[in-house]
Image (spheres, rainbow, N blue to C red):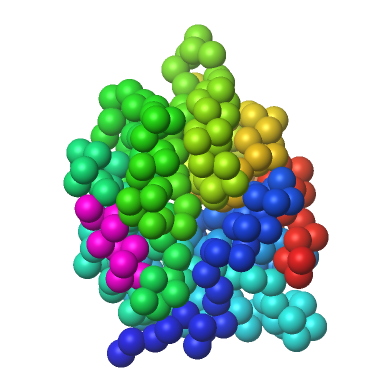
Amino acid sequence: MTTSYSELGLVNTRDLFAKAVKGGYAIPAFNFNNMEQLQAIISACSEVQSPVILQVSKGARQYANQTLLKYLAKGAVEYAKEIGGGRNIPIVLHLDHGDSFELCKDCIASGFSSVMIDGSHHSYEDNIALTKQVVDYAHQFDVTVEGELGVLAGIEDDVQAAAHVYTQPDEVEDFVSRTGVDSLAISIGTSHGAYKFKPGQKAEIRLDILQEIEKRIPGFPIVMHGSSSVPQEYVAIINQYGGKMSDAVGISEAQIREATKSAVCKVNIDSDGRLAMTAAVRKVFATKPEEFDPRKYLGPARDELKKLYMHKCVDVLGSNGHAFD
Ligand code: G3H
Ligand code: 13P
Ligand code: ZN
């Protein structure tokens, strides 16, 4: 059965990005796989009145089940309405790192309002051809599309890249105009996961490359993946209660904030949520070993997640108060 995203009460990214670029803030794209993460995202963003992008990876889609996901997204809209006294914050359901035309097509049929086609591991021309194929299809349903140029170091889904291949500013104008994408993910030194820099390495992203890219495509919506900051307080709690995460380090929140003041209008955050949940769960397991009711450890994890998401909207992305612009 085909479901259009508007039936679920979702929106695409077009207007949200235009307003965010103009307003000098970014929309949070938070990954989720389960109900507690979704509850935390919706309650946090509703409370601070931020638009939000619910992000689902291929792995998350397999984990949560595609049918259930559709109704979770519909439930998220209704939940946001309930919190908002009848008016919900704008909610996008987005495929993160789509790796094929078929996957994007499938997601569009099951109610996604936005898809990413990540052709960054292909040759430049193959990336353009694949991205354009997805754009031409998605736009028939008014679904927006994110493409990617440049390769992030580390693990991107199943593909491992040894080093960053920074986005080449010289290519962006051609890529954007030939594919027709609605937004562009770039590689400027961020990477996925909790180990973004090696010990002793300068923990800095290339804001100079971002500036060069923006000069070539002024005002065009830019996306930053790998934007977790790896809060050291979570890493400390995880390690205190039996975890093993040494040398975990992320992108400073100050650098993310700097990027969002320009055309960066979508910031992807997954790992920080994983850390918040793991820290909270480990703490309960270690300090209350008698507990075996999942609500007693998933509840605190959800509370910690909500705190984290509110902090991201208010102190890092500046998206709070922009839900009804
Ligand atoms: O970019 C990757 C996201 O963090 C999703 O990760 O593929 O393990 O769900 P995942
Ligand atoms: P982090 O691993 O830094 O949270 O990045 C998530 C991401 O880019 C999802 O696409
Ligand atoms: Zn990513």
Indicate the quadrant where residue 264 lies: top right
**Prevailing secondary structure class for the magenta stretch in the rendered image:** helix
Q: Quadrant of the N terminus?
A: bottom left
**Residue at x 44%, y 17% (from the top left corner):** 198
Q: Position of residue 73 (x, y in %)?
A: 51, 76
Task: Between residue 133 and residue 185, name the one nearer to us.
Answer: 133
**Residue at x 75%, y 86% (from the top left corner):** 86
Query: Is residue 171 something one can see in this rendering?
Result: yes
**Residue at x 60%, y 57% (from the top left corner):** 17
Indicate the quadrant where residue 124 lies: top left
Q: Position of residue 190 (x, y in %)?
A: 48, 32
Q: Which residues fall within the magenta stretch?
A: 129-138
Q: How many marks?
A: 0
Q: Position of residue 109 (x, y in %)?
A: 33, 79
Q: Which residue occupies the extreme top position in the image? A: 200
Vertical order, 143 against 190 (above or below): below
Give left or right: position of 308 versus 140.
right
Query: Is residue 281 something one can see in this rendering?
Result: no
Within the magenta stretch, is there residue 48?
Answer: no
Q: Quadrant of the C terminus?
A: bottom right
**Residue at x 74%, y 81% (from the top left corner):** 87
Vertical order, 228 against 88 (above or below): above
Give left or right: position of 248 versus 22.
left
